[in-house]
Image (cartoon, coloured by chain):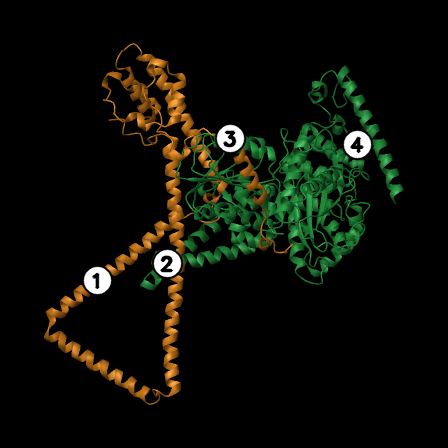
């Protein structure tokens, strides 16, 4: 079916989804920035802590030596020799062991090898993860970080959306006129055209032959944002308007309620009160001169 | 007196309540302000997940989001806000206004708030664009639709005046300054603005109720017309150069016309607060900049080797990589941005022969002077764009208006033969009429030539003299006088009510406002003086300066401002100045709708003598000239009386 193969048109082509998506994307970005910052701090803190621990260990030993609890002299030289001896014996033993019980050690080695690879892999994937995270985070000082640019981008996308809507409306009106004679089915036809005009490159719409229409999708009306409905209403004759396509009612706290005149007054008074205390100045600390 | 910090504080306060998912709505005016003082990532970290314009009609309803609005209390924004409150799209509203909100405006908004969604209304006085810590702009680039001048270069357009008063009031409020005001005597606009500001301070006395400073801060109002030279010069320090050759708009630079530019560098941001390299070098000269950029690139190269895949061999390397990667990426983007920009600057300097032009310009702008021959050579050089030729002739005319009027006339003719069109050439006269030596309060050149020789000799000893950096803006000598207590009351009078001893006190905080736009060169002077003030013993010690203007000019925006303003001035502004040499060609061609330069029965069409209406206008022109002359006589008498 051709309908699915129109990647350059977003679907649903509503301002609604765009705003939602933008907000979601921004949430992602915000969180990514937070994670990056936190992990950075964590790493630094961890490093400092480890260094501190090492420092402690050395310091402790120094303290012990100074207090005479252990005597380094003599024993150190001795212990070094001892260690060498011990190591030599151990390796000799190991060789012997290997000769004696080869299959067992082999298993050990192999599993250790496997675990090492696992660790290396997971570290590599962690590095990859951080790279991806970095891609998500907005870099300071880039154009993406400019508030003005972001607002402009929204405006540009809006304009595109409006253009698409205009094109769509034109096709809808055309199609309605074309199929006005066929009674009974024209609502379905109308829906399909409204639907397909967003989905397809505009050139394709004219090619589609009306008899091969797919059956309309039942939940279609809910996919359209209010603006689509409004703009199509303007140009569609009364009898062709889709039935019952209004938005869900606003949530309770937004519903208007009749208010006596007094309340409006108090509101104004309240606002005035707000005003009198709300004049804000930058606090002293922003002014380096302290004036 | 750090305006960037002040606005930043306001914005942080604004976006930190409420603690939930938020939308930020701005209007055309506040968008650049927020953009300059904050960034998208800062906003994200305060849970602002959508930023949009209040006048965007296609915003979708999102009751789960709360809305922070930062608007200028202008008619359009109030209307948009009303519409928004009538049909609220978000759950709660927090309204912040960038200036004093009138009572009627509050009532208007309160009346439409039927759903009671407004939680807070405050005034945050961030009504100016903070460009640098010591530079702000009111972002008013005069056009035909939004002029600065009314029908003469001495009168304000009412909207522009309103805007300037609001902007300056906001600056004073945000910095908690209740100033005494001085202005340039010759400028009627400066006086008007000063009076308006003082009036505003008095009527809003509860707002301006600050702890009085020992010495009150000073607001010094200057007029661009007293120094038309500074904005016309080629610039040789980083920020000023970028603005002159590429243009900085609200901290953004368009590199779209750079050949072979990478798509991600088509447009870049350039603000010191987000860019450490720019922060360190925005005042550096072009030569120093090249050296610093080279070492910057080298440091990046060494790090990029350390971060190359081949060099990551151990787990420690990986750890290091993860730790350094974000920083490294940022550095990479920054390096390529500056390399692209400096590359483009040097390409333009090379292409337009700006070094040669710059040398002559500096001569014209300072005491040393420049001879006619070098200017002529440049004008006849076909490699130099007509725009730069025009700039040179304007500078020459401003410099030698009185002493070498004949040369000015010959240069205009020469320029017309070398690619400059008549429409543009007329601007030379406009400049002489609007900002010529008779219009200026102090002599830009001769006073300097005596002093400057001594000063440049000193500088030469110190070894900081650079042939392209000889010019110091007129502002610096004004400030020097101020520091030494030599700024005379006759030329820079106080507004009434400053107190009898105002002239004797040495102010600690000085806010300078330039009507008609300031420049980055002046901003640099102010920034350097601020640095100097930290050093005790210098003349500037302990004084904090803040510079502002109706906008920040480069040479083309300045000339465009004068061009668009001249259209509404009396037509005599296009005539050669009255006392000028008789052989200056008349270039006034738009009168009576006849384009004389096309030629016709009148012959070469230099002098316009036909057409009844034309004669009338010419008569008017002569009358204006006479009026000018009378005015000057009166001024002279006044001056004598005052002395």
**Residue B106 left/right relative to B457:** left
Tag nearer the camera, 3 or 4: 3
Q: Examine the rendered structure and indicate whether residue B89 appears above or below residue B490.
A: above
Q: Using the rendered image, report if marks 3 and 1 lie on a common chain.
A: no
Q: CA distance from mark 3 to mark 2?
A: 56 Å
SS category of the residue bearing label 1: helix
- Residue B93 sits above or below residue A282 on the image: above
Q: Residues within 10 Å of mark 3 (few under 14, many from 20)?
A: some
Q: Colour of chain B?
A: green
Give the number of the disc on residue A266: none
The residue where tag 2 is placed is B321
Q: Please give the residue where the numbered disc 3 appears in the rendered image.
A: B112
Q: CA distance from mark 4 to mark 1?
A: 91 Å
Q: Earlier in the sequence, mark 3 or mark 2?
A: 3
Q: Nearer the viewer, residue B560 or A119?
A: A119
The C terminus of chain A is located in which quarter? bottom right
Q: Residues within 10 Å of mark 1 (few under 14, many from 20)?
A: few
Q: Is residue B383 above or below residue B459?
A: above
From this view, report whether residue B613 is shown above or below residue B57.
above
Residue B125 in percent (x, y) is at 59, 43
In which image quadrant can residue A222 be found?
Answer: top left
Residue located beneath label 1 in the image: A115
User: Mark 4 — residue?
Assistant: B577
Q: Secondary structure at mark 2?
A: helix
Q: Which mark sits nearer the N-terminus, 4 or 2?
A: 2
The answer to whether residue A233 shows anywhere in this view is: yes
Taking the view exactly as shown, the residue that stands out farthest to the top is A181
Q: Chain of mark 2?
A: B
Question: A290 or B44: which is nearer to us?
Answer: A290
């Amino acid at each position: 079916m051709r309908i699915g193969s129109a990647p350059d048109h977003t679907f649903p082509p509503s301002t609604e989804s765009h705003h939602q998506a933008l907000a979601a994307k921004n949430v992602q970005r915000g969180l990514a920035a937070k994670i990056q910052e936190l992990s950075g701090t964590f790493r630094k803190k961890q490093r400092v802590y480890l260094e501190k621990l090492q420092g402690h260990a050395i310091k402790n030993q120094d303290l012990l030596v100074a207090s005479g609890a252990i005597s380094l002299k003599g024993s150190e030289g001795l212990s070094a020799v001892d260690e060498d001896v011990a190591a030599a014996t151990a390796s000799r033993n190991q060789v012997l062991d290997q000769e004696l019980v080869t299959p067992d050690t082999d298993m050990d080695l192999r599993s250790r090898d496997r675990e090492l690879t696992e660790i290396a892999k997971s570290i590599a994937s962690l590095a990859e993860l951080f790279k991806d995270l970095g891609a998500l985070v907005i870099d300071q000082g880039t154009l993406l970080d400019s508030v003005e640019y972001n607002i402009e981008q929204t405006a540009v996308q809006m304009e595109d959306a409006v253009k698409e809507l205009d094109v769509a409306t034109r096709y809808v009106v055309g199609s309605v006129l074309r199929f006005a004679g066929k009674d009974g089915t024209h609502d379905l036809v109308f829906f399909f055209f409204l639907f397909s005009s967003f989905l397809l490159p505009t050139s394709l719409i004219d090619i589609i032959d009306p008899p091969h229409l797919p059956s309309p999708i039942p939940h279609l009306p809910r996919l359209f944002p209010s603006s689509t409905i409004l703009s199509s209403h303007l140009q569609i004759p009364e009898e062709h308007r889709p039935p019952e396509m209004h938005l869900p009612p606003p949530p309770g706290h937004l519903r208007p309620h009749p208010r006596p005149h007094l309340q409006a007054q108090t509101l104004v008074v309240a606002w005035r009160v707000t005003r009198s205390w709300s004049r804000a100045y930058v606090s002293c600390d922003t002014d380096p001169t302290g004036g | 007196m750090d305006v960037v910090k002040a606005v930043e504080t306001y914005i942080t306060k604004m976006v930190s309540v409420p603690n939930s998912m938020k939308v930020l709505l701005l209007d055309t005016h506040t968008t650049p302000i927020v953009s300059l003082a904050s960034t998208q990532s800062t906003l994200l970290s305060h849970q602002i997940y959508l930023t949009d314009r209040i006048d965007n009609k296609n915003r979708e309803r999102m009751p789960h989001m709360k809305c922070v609005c930062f608007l200028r209390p202008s008619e359009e924004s109030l209307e948009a806000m009303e519409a928004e409150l009538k049909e609220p799209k978000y759950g709660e509203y927090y309204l912040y206004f960038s200036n004093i909100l009138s009572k009627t405006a509050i009532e208007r908004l309160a009346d439409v708030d039927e759903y009671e969604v407004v939680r807070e209304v405050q005034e945050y006085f961030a009504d100016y664009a903070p460009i640098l810590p010591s530079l702000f702009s009111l972002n008013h680039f005069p056009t035909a639709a939004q002029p600065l001048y009314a029908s003469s270069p001495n009168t304000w357009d009412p909207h522009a005046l309103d805007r300037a008063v609001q902007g300056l009031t906001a600056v004073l409020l945000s910095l908690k300054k209740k100033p005494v005001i001085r202005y340039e005597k010759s400028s009627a606009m400066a006086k008007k603005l000063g009076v308006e500001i003082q009036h505003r301070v008095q009527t809003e006395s509860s707002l301006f109720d600050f702890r009085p400073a020992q010495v009150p801060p000073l607001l010094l109002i200057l007029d661009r017309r007293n120094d038309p030279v500074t904005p016309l010069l080629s610039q040789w320090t980083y920020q000023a150069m970028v603005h002159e050759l590429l243009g900085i708009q609200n901290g953004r630079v368009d590199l779209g016309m750079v050949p072979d530019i990478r798509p991600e560098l088509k447009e870049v941001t350039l603000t010191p607060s987000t860019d450490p390299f720019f922060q360190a070098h925005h005042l550096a000269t072009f030569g120093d900049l090249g050296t610093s950029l080279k070492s910057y690139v080298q440091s990046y190269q060494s790090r990029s080797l350390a971060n190359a895949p081949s060099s990551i061999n151990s787990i420690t390397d990986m750890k290091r990589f993860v730790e350094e990667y974000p920083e490294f990426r940022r550095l990479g983007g920054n390096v390529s941005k500056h390399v692209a920009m400096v590359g483009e600057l040097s390409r333009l300097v090379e292409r337009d022969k700006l070094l040669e032009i710059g040398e002559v310009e500096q001569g014209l702008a300072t005491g040393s002077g420049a001879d006619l021959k070098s200017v002529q050579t440049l004008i006849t050089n076909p490699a130099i764009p007509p725009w730069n030729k025009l700039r040179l002739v304007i500078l020459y005319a401003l410099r030698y208006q009185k002493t070498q009027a004949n040369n000015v006339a010959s240069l205009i003719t020469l320029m017309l033969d070398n690619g400059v069109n008549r429409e543009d050439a007329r601007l030379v006269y406009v400049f002489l009429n609007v900002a010529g030596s008779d219009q200026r309060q102090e002599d830009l050149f001769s006073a300097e030539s005596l002093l400057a020789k001594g000063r440049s000799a000193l500088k030469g000893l110190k070894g900081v003299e650079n042939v392209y950096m000889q010019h110091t803006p007129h502002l610096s000598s004004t400030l020097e006088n101020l520091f030494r207590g030599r700024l005379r009351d006759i030329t820079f009078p106080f507004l009434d009510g400053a107190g009898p001893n105002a002239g004797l006190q040495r102010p600690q905080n000085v806010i300078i406002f330039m009507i008609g736009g300031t420049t980055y060169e002046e901003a640099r002077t102010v920034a350097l003086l601020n640095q100097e003030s930290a050093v005790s013993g210098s003349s500037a010690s302990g004084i904090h300066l803040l510079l502002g203007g109706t906008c920040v000019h480069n040479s083309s925006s300045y000339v465009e401002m004068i061009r668009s303003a001249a259209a509404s001035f009396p037509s005599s502004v296009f005539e050669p100045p009255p006392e000028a040499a008789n052989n200056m060609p008349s270039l006034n061609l738009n009168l009576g709708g006849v384009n004389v330069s096309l030629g016709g029965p009148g012959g070469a069409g230099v002098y316009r003598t036909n057409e009844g209406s034309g004669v009338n206008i010419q008569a008017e022109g002569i009358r204006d000239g006479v009026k000018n002359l009378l005015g000057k006589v009166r001024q002279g008498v006044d001056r004598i009386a005052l002395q």
